[in-house]
Image (cartoon, rainbow, N blue to C red):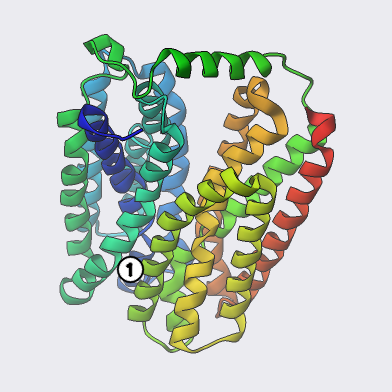
Amino acid sequence: MKISGRHLLVLVAMCGLIASGIGLVTNVSGLFFTPVADEFGILKGSASLMLTICNVALAIGGMLVPRLLNERTLKPVLIGATATLAASTAALAVCPSIMPMYLLSAVRGFAAGFVTFVFVTSVLNNWFVANIGLATSIAMGCSGLAGAAFSPVVNGIIQSMGWRAGFVVLGVLTVVLNLPAILFLPALDPKSVGLEPLGASEAAVATTAKSQDESSKASPINMAVLGAVIAYALFASAVTALPQHFPGLCESYALGTALGASMLSLCMIANTAGKIVLGALIDKAGTKLSVLLYAALVAAGLALMLVMRSSQMLLFSAVLVGLVYSLGTVGISMLTRDAFGLANYGRTYPTVTLVGNMANAAFSSIVGFMYDFTGGYTLTLLMFLAMMVAVIALVVFVYGQKPKAA
Protein backbone atom coordinates (compact mmCIF):
# COMPACT_ATOMS: atom_id res chain seq x y z
CA MET A 1 0.00 0.00 0.00
CA LYS A 2 1.31 3.40 -0.99
CA ILE A 3 2.26 5.83 1.78
CA SER A 4 0.91 9.25 0.86
CA GLY A 5 -0.94 12.30 2.14
CA ARG A 6 -0.99 12.93 5.89
CA HIS A 7 0.58 9.54 6.62
CA LEU A 8 3.58 10.47 4.48
CA LEU A 9 3.94 13.77 6.34
CA VAL A 10 3.85 11.92 9.66
CA LEU A 11 6.56 9.53 8.43
CA VAL A 12 8.71 12.46 7.27
CA ALA A 13 8.23 14.09 10.66
CA MET A 14 9.37 10.93 12.47
CA CYS A 15 12.38 10.69 10.17
CA GLY A 16 13.34 14.22 11.21
CA LEU A 17 13.12 13.37 14.91
CA ILE A 18 15.35 10.32 14.55
CA ALA A 19 17.78 12.25 12.35
CA SER A 20 18.18 14.99 14.96
CA GLY A 21 17.82 13.04 18.20
CA ILE A 22 20.04 10.12 17.18
CA GLY A 23 21.84 11.13 13.99
CA LEU A 24 23.10 14.50 15.23
CA VAL A 25 23.35 13.65 18.91
CA THR A 26 25.32 10.40 18.64
CA ASN A 27 26.37 9.64 15.08
CA VAL A 28 28.57 12.71 14.54
CA SER A 29 29.84 12.99 18.11
CA GLY A 30 33.14 11.29 17.35
CA LEU A 31 34.22 14.28 15.29
CA PHE A 32 34.45 16.35 18.48
CA PHE A 33 36.46 13.97 20.70
CA THR A 34 39.95 14.84 19.44
CA PRO A 35 39.61 18.65 19.16
CA VAL A 36 37.90 18.91 22.57
CA ALA A 37 40.56 16.71 24.19
CA ASP A 38 43.35 18.73 22.57
CA GLU A 39 41.97 22.12 23.62
CA PHE A 40 41.36 21.17 27.25
CA GLY A 41 44.45 18.98 27.58
CA ILE A 42 42.49 15.90 28.65
CA LEU A 43 42.46 12.25 27.62
CA LYS A 44 40.39 11.27 24.62
CA GLY A 45 38.46 8.93 26.89
CA SER A 46 37.51 11.89 29.06
CA ALA A 47 36.19 13.71 26.00
CA SER A 48 34.23 10.68 24.77
CA LEU A 49 32.62 10.43 28.20
CA MET A 50 30.30 13.20 26.93
CA LEU A 51 28.67 10.66 24.62
CA THR A 52 28.42 8.07 27.38
CA ILE A 53 26.61 10.52 29.65
CA CYS A 54 24.40 11.62 26.76
CA ASN A 55 23.36 8.06 25.87
CA VAL A 56 22.59 7.13 29.47
CA ALA A 57 20.42 10.23 29.83
CA LEU A 58 18.75 9.44 26.50
CA ALA A 59 17.76 5.98 27.76
CA ILE A 60 16.34 7.48 30.96
CA GLY A 61 14.38 10.13 29.05
CA GLY A 62 12.91 7.50 26.75
CA MET A 63 11.66 5.43 29.69
CA LEU A 64 9.57 8.40 30.87
CA VAL A 65 7.80 8.91 27.54
CA PRO A 66 4.93 6.42 28.08
CA ARG A 67 4.05 8.08 31.39
CA LEU A 68 4.13 11.66 30.16
CA LEU A 69 2.97 11.51 26.55
CA ASN A 70 -0.69 11.87 25.57
CA GLU A 71 -2.75 13.93 23.15
CA ARG A 72 -2.79 16.91 25.51
CA THR A 73 0.96 16.92 26.12
CA LEU A 74 2.03 16.08 22.55
CA LYS A 75 2.90 19.58 21.34
CA PRO A 76 4.40 20.79 24.65
CA VAL A 77 6.66 17.71 24.76
CA LEU A 78 7.74 18.19 21.15
CA ILE A 79 8.42 21.91 21.48
CA GLY A 80 10.00 21.70 24.92
CA ALA A 81 12.27 18.78 24.04
CA THR A 82 13.33 20.42 20.78
CA ALA A 83 14.12 23.73 22.46
CA THR A 84 16.06 22.03 25.24
CA LEU A 85 17.95 19.78 22.83
CA ALA A 86 18.90 22.64 20.50
CA ALA A 87 19.84 25.04 23.30
CA SER A 88 21.97 22.52 25.21
CA THR A 89 23.75 21.54 22.00
CA ALA A 90 24.57 25.12 21.07
CA ALA A 91 25.59 25.89 24.66
CA LEU A 92 28.39 23.32 24.40
CA ALA A 93 30.16 25.90 22.24
CA VAL A 94 30.76 28.27 25.15
CA CYS A 95 31.96 25.76 27.75
CA PRO A 96 35.33 26.71 29.32
CA SER A 97 36.12 23.16 30.51
CA ILE A 98 34.95 19.58 30.22
CA MET A 99 32.81 19.50 33.38
CA PRO A 100 30.03 21.81 32.12
CA MET A 101 30.10 19.83 28.87
CA TYR A 102 29.26 16.71 30.87
CA LEU A 103 26.29 18.48 32.44
CA LEU A 104 25.04 19.78 29.11
CA SER A 105 25.48 16.33 27.57
CA ALA A 106 23.17 14.92 30.23
CA VAL A 107 20.55 17.59 29.49
CA ARG A 108 20.98 17.05 25.76
CA GLY A 109 20.55 13.28 26.01
CA PHE A 110 17.57 13.52 28.34
CA ALA A 111 15.77 15.84 25.92
CA ALA A 112 16.61 13.61 22.96
CA GLY A 113 15.12 10.65 24.80
CA PHE A 114 11.69 12.28 24.67
CA VAL A 115 11.59 12.55 20.87
CA THR A 116 13.42 9.47 19.59
CA PHE A 117 12.84 5.72 19.74
CA VAL A 118 9.91 5.37 22.16
CA PHE A 119 8.12 8.47 20.87
CA VAL A 120 8.65 7.62 17.19
CA THR A 121 7.62 3.97 17.43
CA SER A 122 4.53 4.91 19.46
CA VAL A 123 3.42 7.35 16.76
CA LEU A 124 4.16 4.95 13.90
CA ASN A 125 2.29 2.08 15.56
CA ASN A 126 -0.76 4.32 15.85
CA TRP A 127 -0.61 5.79 12.34
CA PHE A 128 0.31 2.64 10.38
CA VAL A 129 -1.27 -0.79 10.15
CA ALA A 130 -0.12 -1.54 6.63
CA ASN A 131 3.57 -0.95 5.87
CA ILE A 132 4.44 -0.60 9.56
CA GLY A 133 7.70 -2.50 9.04
CA LEU A 134 8.68 -0.32 6.10
CA ALA A 135 7.75 2.87 7.90
CA THR A 136 9.73 1.87 11.00
CA SER A 137 12.83 0.86 9.04
CA ILE A 138 12.77 4.10 7.05
CA ALA A 139 12.47 6.21 10.19
CA MET A 140 15.18 4.32 12.07
CA GLY A 141 17.44 4.39 9.04
CA CYS A 142 17.45 8.18 9.16
CA SER A 143 19.81 8.09 12.13
CA GLY A 144 22.50 6.75 9.82
CA LEU A 145 21.43 8.96 6.92
CA ALA A 146 21.88 12.05 9.07
CA GLY A 147 25.30 10.84 10.16
CA ALA A 148 26.32 10.21 6.57
CA ALA A 149 25.02 13.55 5.33
CA PHE A 150 26.27 15.78 8.12
CA SER A 151 29.57 14.15 9.16
CA PRO A 152 31.60 15.70 6.31
CA VAL A 153 29.80 19.04 6.72
CA VAL A 154 30.43 19.21 10.45
CA ASN A 155 34.01 17.99 10.03
CA GLY A 156 34.63 20.77 7.51
CA ILE A 157 33.23 23.35 9.92
CA ILE A 158 35.41 22.01 12.73
CA GLN A 159 38.51 22.11 10.54
CA SER A 160 37.87 25.64 9.28
CA MET A 161 36.10 27.35 12.20
CA GLY A 162 36.71 25.12 15.22
CA TRP A 163 34.68 22.64 17.23
CA ARG A 164 32.70 25.36 18.99
CA ALA A 165 31.18 26.48 15.71
CA GLY A 166 30.36 22.86 15.00
CA PHE A 167 28.13 22.64 18.07
CA VAL A 168 26.30 25.83 17.11
CA VAL A 169 25.57 24.40 13.67
CA LEU A 170 24.26 21.19 15.26
CA GLY A 171 21.92 23.24 17.45
CA VAL A 172 20.46 25.01 14.41
CA LEU A 173 20.09 21.75 12.48
CA THR A 174 18.21 20.22 15.41
CA VAL A 175 15.49 22.85 15.14
CA VAL A 176 15.28 22.46 11.35
CA LEU A 177 14.94 18.68 11.50
CA ASN A 178 12.34 18.74 14.30
CA LEU A 179 10.13 21.36 12.66
CA PRO A 180 8.17 18.85 10.50
CA ALA A 181 7.05 17.01 13.64
CA ILE A 182 6.03 20.23 15.36
CA LEU A 183 4.15 21.44 12.28
CA PHE A 184 2.76 18.28 10.67
CA LEU A 185 2.03 15.79 13.47
CA PRO A 186 -1.59 16.51 14.48
CA ALA A 187 -2.03 13.78 17.08
CA LEU A 188 -0.57 10.63 18.59
CA ASP A 189 -3.58 8.64 17.36
CA PRO A 190 -5.08 9.62 13.99
CA LYS A 191 -8.55 8.61 15.18
CA SER A 192 -8.52 11.48 17.65
CA VAL A 193 -8.53 13.91 14.70
CA GLY A 194 -10.95 11.98 12.51
CA LEU A 195 -8.36 10.06 10.49
CA GLU A 196 -7.61 6.35 10.14
CA PRO A 197 -4.30 4.47 10.39
CA LEU A 198 -2.88 3.53 7.01
CA GLY A 199 -4.34 0.19 5.95
CA ALA A 200 -6.89 0.02 8.76
CA SER A 201 -9.32 -2.06 6.70
CA GLU A 202 -11.49 -4.85 8.04
CA ALA A 203 -9.16 -7.39 6.48
CA ALA A 204 -6.12 -5.86 8.16
CA VAL A 205 -7.90 -5.72 11.51
CA ALA A 206 -8.99 -9.34 11.15
CA THR A 207 -5.47 -10.42 10.28
CA THR A 208 -4.05 -8.52 13.23
CA ALA A 209 -6.64 -9.98 15.57
CA LYS A 210 -5.91 -13.49 14.34
CA SER A 211 -2.18 -12.99 14.80
CA GLN A 212 -2.69 -11.62 18.29
CA ASP A 213 -5.02 -14.52 19.22
CA GLU A 214 -2.49 -17.08 18.06
CA SER A 215 0.17 -15.65 20.36
CA SER A 216 -2.07 -14.60 23.24
CA LYS A 217 -1.00 -17.43 25.55
CA ALA A 218 2.10 -16.38 27.41
CA SER A 219 4.50 -19.17 28.31
CA PRO A 220 7.13 -19.10 31.04
CA ILE A 221 10.22 -17.19 30.02
CA ASN A 222 13.29 -19.35 29.49
CA MET A 223 15.84 -17.48 31.59
CA ALA A 224 18.81 -19.01 29.75
CA VAL A 225 17.44 -17.69 26.46
CA LEU A 226 16.71 -14.31 28.03
CA GLY A 227 20.29 -14.14 29.27
CA ALA A 228 21.55 -15.01 25.79
CA VAL A 229 19.38 -12.34 24.13
CA ILE A 230 20.55 -9.77 26.69
CA ALA A 231 24.17 -10.74 26.01
CA TYR A 232 23.50 -10.41 22.28
CA ALA A 233 22.14 -6.90 22.84
CA LEU A 234 25.13 -5.99 25.00
CA PHE A 235 27.72 -7.15 22.45
CA ALA A 236 25.97 -5.87 19.32
CA SER A 237 25.31 -2.48 20.90
CA ALA A 238 28.84 -2.24 22.30
CA VAL A 239 30.31 -2.52 18.80
CA THR A 240 28.15 0.40 17.63
CA ALA A 241 30.40 2.60 19.79
CA LEU A 242 33.37 2.00 17.47
CA PRO A 243 32.44 4.16 14.42
CA GLN A 244 32.55 7.36 16.47
CA HIS A 245 36.25 6.62 16.96
CA PHE A 246 37.04 6.22 13.24
CA PRO A 247 38.69 9.67 13.08
CA GLY A 248 40.96 8.67 15.97
CA LEU A 249 41.63 5.27 14.38
CA CYS A 250 42.80 6.89 11.15
CA GLU A 251 44.89 9.38 13.07
CA SER A 252 46.60 6.50 14.87
CA TYR A 253 47.33 4.96 11.46
CA ALA A 254 48.81 8.32 10.32
CA LEU A 255 46.11 8.62 7.65
CA GLY A 256 44.42 11.81 8.88
CA THR A 257 41.05 12.57 10.42
CA ALA A 258 39.50 13.43 7.05
CA LEU A 259 39.65 9.75 6.10
CA GLY A 260 38.06 8.93 9.44
CA ALA A 261 35.21 11.33 8.68
CA SER A 262 34.73 9.65 5.30
CA MET A 263 34.71 6.25 7.00
CA LEU A 264 32.08 7.51 9.41
CA SER A 265 30.01 8.84 6.53
CA LEU A 266 30.11 5.52 4.65
CA CYS A 267 29.39 3.70 7.88
CA MET A 268 26.24 5.79 8.36
CA ILE A 269 25.14 4.99 4.81
CA ALA A 270 25.53 1.30 5.64
CA ASN A 271 23.63 1.99 8.85
CA THR A 272 20.68 3.34 6.87
CA ALA A 273 20.65 0.92 3.95
CA GLY A 274 21.56 -2.03 6.13
CA LYS A 275 18.43 -1.75 8.25
CA ILE A 276 16.13 -1.77 5.23
CA VAL A 277 18.03 -4.65 3.61
CA LEU A 278 18.03 -6.65 6.83
CA GLY A 279 14.26 -6.23 7.11
CA ALA A 280 13.84 -7.56 3.55
CA LEU A 281 16.23 -10.46 4.25
CA ILE A 282 14.33 -11.39 7.40
CA ASP A 283 11.08 -11.49 5.42
CA LYS A 284 12.68 -13.83 2.87
CA ALA A 285 15.11 -15.99 4.85
CA GLY A 286 14.13 -15.55 8.48
CA THR A 287 15.81 -13.79 11.38
CA LYS A 288 18.38 -16.45 12.23
CA LEU A 289 20.13 -16.67 8.86
CA SER A 290 19.88 -12.93 8.22
CA VAL A 291 21.38 -11.96 11.56
CA LEU A 292 24.13 -14.57 11.25
CA LEU A 293 25.05 -13.19 7.82
CA TYR A 294 25.23 -9.64 9.12
CA ALA A 295 27.29 -10.67 12.15
CA ALA A 296 29.77 -12.47 9.90
CA LEU A 297 30.10 -9.39 7.66
CA VAL A 298 30.70 -7.11 10.66
CA ALA A 299 33.34 -9.52 11.96
CA ALA A 300 35.03 -9.45 8.55
CA GLY A 301 35.07 -5.63 8.62
CA LEU A 302 36.68 -5.59 12.06
CA ALA A 303 39.31 -8.10 10.92
CA LEU A 304 40.12 -5.91 7.91
CA MET A 305 40.61 -2.88 10.16
CA LEU A 306 43.11 -4.88 12.19
CA VAL A 307 45.37 -5.85 9.31
CA MET A 308 44.81 -3.26 6.56
CA ARG A 309 46.23 0.26 6.39
CA SER A 310 45.15 1.38 2.91
CA SER A 311 42.46 4.03 2.67
CA GLN A 312 40.42 1.95 0.20
CA MET A 313 40.29 -1.11 2.44
CA LEU A 314 39.50 0.97 5.52
CA LEU A 315 36.60 2.62 3.70
CA PHE A 316 35.32 -0.81 2.65
CA SER A 317 35.68 -2.16 6.17
CA ALA A 318 33.74 0.84 7.51
CA VAL A 319 30.79 -0.16 5.31
CA LEU A 320 30.86 -3.69 6.72
CA VAL A 321 31.13 -2.48 10.31
CA GLY A 322 28.21 -0.11 9.67
CA LEU A 323 25.93 -3.13 9.44
CA VAL A 324 26.28 -3.57 13.20
CA TYR A 325 23.71 -0.80 13.71
CA SER A 326 21.13 -3.10 12.11
CA LEU A 327 22.08 -5.87 14.53
CA GLY A 328 21.66 -3.44 17.43
CA THR A 329 18.18 -2.27 16.39
CA VAL A 330 16.25 -4.48 13.96
CA GLY A 331 18.19 -7.56 15.07
CA ILE A 332 17.43 -7.04 18.76
CA SER A 333 13.73 -6.50 18.09
CA MET A 334 13.28 -9.53 15.82
CA LEU A 335 15.44 -11.83 17.94
CA THR A 336 13.40 -10.94 21.04
CA ARG A 337 10.14 -11.43 19.17
CA ASP A 338 11.21 -14.83 17.81
CA ALA A 339 12.59 -16.03 21.14
CA PHE A 340 9.67 -15.07 23.37
CA GLY A 341 6.66 -14.46 21.12
CA LEU A 342 4.33 -11.48 21.10
CA ALA A 343 2.82 -12.34 24.47
CA ASN A 344 6.16 -12.06 26.28
CA TYR A 345 7.64 -9.38 24.04
CA GLY A 346 6.50 -6.52 26.26
CA ARG A 347 7.98 -8.22 29.31
CA THR A 348 11.41 -8.78 27.81
CA TYR A 349 12.11 -6.13 25.17
CA PRO A 350 12.44 -3.12 27.54
CA THR A 351 15.11 -4.93 29.56
CA VAL A 352 16.98 -6.04 26.46
CA THR A 353 17.01 -2.57 24.92
CA LEU A 354 18.03 -0.94 28.20
CA VAL A 355 21.09 -3.19 28.35
CA GLY A 356 21.87 -2.32 24.73
CA ASN A 357 21.63 1.41 25.37
CA MET A 358 23.85 1.17 28.44
CA ALA A 359 26.39 -0.92 26.54
CA ASN A 360 26.68 1.67 23.80
CA ALA A 361 26.96 4.42 26.38
CA ALA A 362 29.66 2.64 28.37
CA PHE A 363 31.79 1.53 25.44
CA SER A 364 31.77 4.99 23.88
CA SER A 365 34.09 5.96 26.72
CA ILE A 366 35.77 2.59 27.22
CA VAL A 367 37.14 2.71 23.67
CA GLY A 368 38.56 6.16 24.30
CA PHE A 369 40.23 5.12 27.54
CA MET A 370 41.60 1.95 25.94
CA TYR A 371 43.27 4.14 23.34
CA ASP A 372 44.68 6.43 26.03
CA PHE A 373 46.23 3.53 27.92
CA THR A 374 47.40 1.39 24.98
CA GLY A 375 48.27 4.07 22.41
CA GLY A 376 46.22 2.44 19.67
CA TYR A 377 43.04 0.60 18.72
CA THR A 378 44.38 -2.94 18.22
CA LEU A 379 43.11 -4.25 21.54
CA THR A 380 39.75 -2.56 20.96
CA LEU A 381 39.34 -4.16 17.53
CA LEU A 382 40.29 -7.58 18.93
CA MET A 383 37.75 -7.16 21.73
CA PHE A 384 34.96 -6.21 19.33
CA LEU A 385 35.89 -9.05 16.97
CA ALA A 386 35.52 -11.48 19.87
CA MET A 387 32.14 -9.93 20.66
CA MET A 388 30.89 -10.55 17.13
CA VAL A 389 32.01 -14.17 17.31
CA ALA A 390 30.05 -14.38 20.56
CA VAL A 391 27.01 -12.83 18.82
CA ILE A 392 27.10 -15.61 16.23
CA ALA A 393 27.28 -18.25 18.97
CA LEU A 394 24.46 -16.62 20.93
CA VAL A 395 22.12 -16.52 17.92
CA VAL A 396 22.75 -20.21 17.26
CA PHE A 397 22.05 -20.96 20.93
CA VAL A 398 18.82 -18.93 21.05
CA TYR A 399 17.34 -20.66 18.03
CA GLY A 400 18.53 -24.03 19.31
CA GLN A 401 16.50 -23.40 22.48
CA LYS A 402 13.54 -21.77 20.72
CA PRO A 403 11.09 -24.71 21.10
CA LYS A 404 11.67 -24.61 24.85
CA ALA A 405 11.05 -20.85 24.93
CA ALA A 406 7.90 -20.96 22.77
Residue 280 vs residue 338, the one in the foreground: 280
Q: Amino acid at mark 1?
A: Phe
Measuring from the top left, give residue 83's x and y in whole percent: 19, 36
Measuring from the top left, give residue 71's x and y in whole percent: 28, 14
Up/down of 63 relative to 36, above or below: above
Measuring from the top left, give residue 277's x and y in whole percent: 49, 53
Up/down of 218 relative to 116, above or below: above
Q: Which residue is mark 1?
A: 40
Specify the quadrant that holds the C terminus: top right
Measuring from the top left, give residue 45's x and y in whole percent: 48, 64
Residue in view at x 50 percent, y 58 percent = 364
Residue in view at x 21 percent, y 39 percent = 178
Q: Quadrant of residue 388?
A: bottom right
Q: Quadrant of residue 98?
A: bottom left
Q: Secondary structure at mark 1?
A: helix
Is residue 47 in view? no
Going by the image, does 275 lie left or right of 356?
left
Q: Quadrant of residue 68?
A: top left
Residue 68 vs residue 118, the one in the foreground: 118
Up/down of 375 relative to 152, above or below: below
Residue 77 vs residue 392, the one in the foreground: 392
